[in-house]
Image: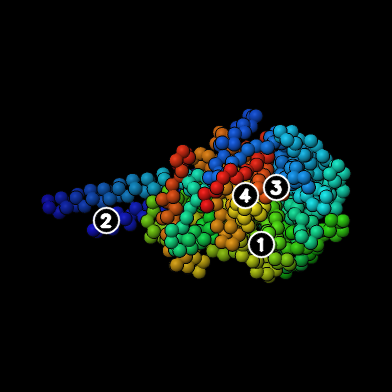
């Protein structure tokens, strides 16, 4: 009886965890596949607050900008409004999934990737100017 | 704590899977796709967002497929209208003077050999790149009273890409770009869709120097002889002609995928640099360095390439820039960056490669069609020494799939850092051409040029081109010449 009760509780916990994860993932997808305009005409000039962010901006331009232009929705999904934590961004860059290519350490060094993550986190907070319609 | 870790891990896994699948799951949403344009084009400068301290106005409208602007000695703007557009739309190529008030006066007209791709003014005349879709490319000298002389002709322009530019060097030579016949050196069914393969089934790319082939051949249907057997085609060869490993294709000038130059009085063109795909925009920096905007590979044809950037290069005389086996300095078979989803990896067609290409100044948006370029030379406008780039915008799905519209704006690029940002873009929740957004802003910027004083940036907007089931559908009399000036202190 006690074993049966424990089994039901564990099953309920697993369902709850999976549901929460799916909900969170769905939210990320909704945001991630949308727009995230941050360019100067829309949001004003972006000033890198630290040397790390500045280096990250340069590395972003070199490796990420062609597909995620300006971090906006473009050829590939938007990045600017995706609240992904740093470790997930790194995992995605290193593993590459679906149409996203892999970027091994021989292409993007660990330090460059750290800088890119710092830039991506900074650009999220660079919001459109008052009066500009944004996604 | 354990539950949180489990939830995080599950979330991470699901998030990665669905985000990665985003590209595969969603259909293409290019800027010209699904747009029903009935006209007339609405022109509303306030629908264009600019950095603080700048304003935009329409100088002329109702132009048909404009591709370039230049200024005479008095600072009067002149525009070239192409006379041909993708979608096999033929009109009359024209050089027109833009009068005050926006009226245009015809200076010269061409024949059925467009597109006229760009114009420069110097040595007291206009220099026009005649694309040469039917008779081959030419560089034309047009006097101010409209007399046309052919400075060079017989350029290999019968294919996908044409004769582009031109730009006048401080050495007095006329520099111009010559695009490739194909997407990635192999003639295929996609070239029939462009329209030229049935007209010129023998046409193919010509290398500027001898190249040795890897012997890779690509099977396709035969649109020239519908219902016929499948054919195999190798690189730098006519459609249906296979190649063998080790075969040498002799180089010659004029050639495809090159920057060439010719004296203003004419004569044989000389090679400046090669290994470009479509070097559309040329401009000399204030220090005299030649820069070029190159349209990157498409995901189409017998040898499709996925995710290839448009590239800004600083041109080193004599260098090879990587086409058809590199993109932006990276080998196409390196990693999986250029593998088209569900299609074979683009393996090299040359062996050995002619060299190691340089690294680009900047890599811009995939399918953005980064075209005309010019440098700011004046503090009166600001951003002195920075490059401005007109982005025509994607031609999805023909050029390949894109999740959202790409391009349709003017970019500003610091050529020292490689950092680019928008300079002029349509307002709205997403970027895209005005005809898609439903406002009166930019459609397809194809060229930019500063006036002689350097205080006004003119933007040539090709006009509306939708992408329908039959391919590109360009709309005549929808082109606009815009002017951007500074109104006060810029925000930086």
**Distance from label 1 to label 2 (Cα)?**
51 Å
Is the residue under label 4 in contact with that under label 1 (CB below 8 Å)? Answer: no
Q: Would residue A47 be visible to someone looking at this image? A: yes
Is the residue under label 3 in contact with that under label 4 (CB below 8 Å)? Answer: no
| Labels 4 and 2: the sequence-earlier one | 2
The chain to which mark 4 is attached is B
**Distance from label 1 to label 3 (Cα)?**
23 Å
Reading the image, the residue beneath label 4 is: B381
The chain to which mark 2 is attached is B
**Distance from label 4 to label 2 (Cα)?**
55 Å
x 19%, y 49%: residue: A8
Secondary structure found at label 4: loop
Judging depth in this view, the residue of B402 and B58 nearest the camera is B58
Q: Nearer the viewer, mark 4 or mark 2?
A: 4
| Labels 1 and 2: the sequence-earlier one | 2
| Labels 3 and 2: the sequence-earlier one | 2
Q: Position of residue B190 (x, y in %)?
A: 68, 48
**Distance from label 3 to label 2 (Cα)?**
61 Å
The chain to which mark 3 is attached is B
| Labels 1 and 4: the sequence-earlier one | 1
x 71%, y 39%: residue: B65
Task: Report whether mark 4 lies on the same chain as mark 2.
Answer: yes
Reading the image, the residue beneath label 2 is: B4
Quarter of the image where one finds residue B66: top right
Judging depth in this view, the residue of B174 and B181 nearest the camera is B174
Q: Position of residue B482 (x, y in %)?
A: 65, 40
**Which color scheme is applied?**
rainbow
Reading the image, the residue beneath label 3 is: B451
Asked if B443 appears above or below A126 in the picture, the reply is above
Q: Residue furthest left?
A: A1
Task: Report whether mark 3 lies on the same chain as mark 2.
Answer: yes
């Amino acid at each position: 009886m006690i074993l049966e009760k424990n089994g039901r509780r564990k099953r309920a916990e697993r369902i709850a965890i999976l549901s929460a994860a799916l909900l969170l993932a769905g939210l990320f997808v909704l945001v991630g596949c949308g727009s995230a305009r941050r360019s100067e005409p829309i949001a004003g000039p972006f000033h890198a607050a630290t040397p790390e962010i500045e280096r990250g901006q340069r590395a972003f331009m070199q490796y990420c900008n062609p597909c995620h232009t300006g971090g906006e929705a473009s050829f590939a999904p938007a990045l600017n409004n995706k609240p992904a934590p740093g470790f997930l961004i790194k995992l995605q860059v290193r593993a590459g999934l679906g149409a996203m290519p892999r970027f091994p350490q021989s292409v993007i060094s660990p330090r460059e990737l750290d800088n890119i993550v710092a830039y991506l986190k900074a650009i999220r907070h660079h919001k459109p100017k008052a009066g500009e319609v944004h996604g | 704590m354990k539950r949180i870790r489990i939830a995080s891990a599950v979330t991470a896994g699901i998030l990665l899977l669905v985000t990665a699948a985003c590209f595969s799951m969603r259909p293409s949403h290019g800027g010209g796709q699904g747009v029903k344009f009935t006209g007339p084009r609405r022109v509303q400068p306030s629908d264009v967002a600019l950095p603080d301290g700048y304003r935009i106005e329409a100088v002329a409208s109702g132009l048909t497929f404009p591709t370039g602007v230049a200024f005479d000695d008095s600072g009067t703007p002149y525009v070239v209208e192409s006379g041909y557009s993708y979608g096999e739309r033929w009109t009359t190529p024209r050089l027109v003077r833009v009068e005050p008030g926006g009226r245009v006066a015809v200076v010269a007209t061409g024949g059925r050999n467009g597109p006229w791709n760009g114009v420069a003014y110097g040595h007291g005349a206009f220099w026009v790149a005649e694309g040469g879709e039917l008779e081959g490319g030419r560089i034309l000298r047009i006097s101010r009273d409209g007399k046309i002389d052919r400075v060079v002709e017989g350029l290999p322009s019968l294919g996908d890409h044409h004769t582009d530019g031109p730009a006048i060097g401080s050495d007095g030579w006329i520099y111009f770009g010559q695009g490739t016949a194909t997407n990635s050196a192999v003639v295929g069914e996609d070239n029939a869709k462009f329209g030229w393969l049935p007209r010129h089934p023998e046409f193919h790319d010509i290398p500027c120097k001898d190249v040795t082939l890897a012997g890779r051949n690509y099977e396709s249907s035969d649109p020239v002889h519908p219902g016929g057997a499948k054919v195999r085609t190798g690189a730098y060869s006519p459609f249906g002609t296979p190649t063998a490993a080790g075969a040498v294709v002799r180089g010659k000038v004029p050639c495809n995928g090159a920057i060439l130059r010719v004296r203003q009085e004419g004569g044989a063109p000389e090679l400046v640099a090669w290994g470009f795909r479509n070097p559309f925009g040329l401009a000399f920096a204030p220090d005299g360095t030649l820069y070029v905007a190159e349209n990157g590979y498409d995901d189409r044809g017998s040898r499709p390439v996925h995710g290839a950037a448009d590239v800004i290069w600083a041109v080193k005389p004599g260098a090879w820039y990587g086409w058809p086996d590199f993109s932006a300095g990276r080998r196409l078979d390196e990693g999986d960056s250029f593998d088209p989803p569900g299609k074979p990896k683009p393996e090299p067609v040359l062996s050995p490669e002619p060299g190691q290409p340089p690294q680009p100044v900047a890599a811009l948006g995939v399918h953005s069609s980064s075209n005309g370029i010019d440098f700011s030379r004046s503090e009166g406008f600001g951003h002195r020494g920075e490059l401005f780039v007109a982005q025509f915008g994607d031609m999805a799905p023909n050029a390949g799939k894109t999740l959202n519209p790409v391009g349709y704006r003017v970019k500003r690029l610091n050529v020292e850092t490689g950092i680019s940002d928008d300079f002029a873009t349509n307002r709205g929740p997403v970027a895209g051409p005005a005809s898609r957004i439903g406002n009166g802003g930019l459609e397809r910027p194809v060229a930019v040029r500063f006036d002689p004083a350097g205080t006004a940036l003119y933007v040539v907007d090709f006009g509306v081109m939708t992408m329908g089931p039959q391919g590109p559908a360009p709309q005549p009399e929808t082109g606009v010449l815009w002017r951007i000036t500074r109104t006060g202190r810029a925000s930086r």
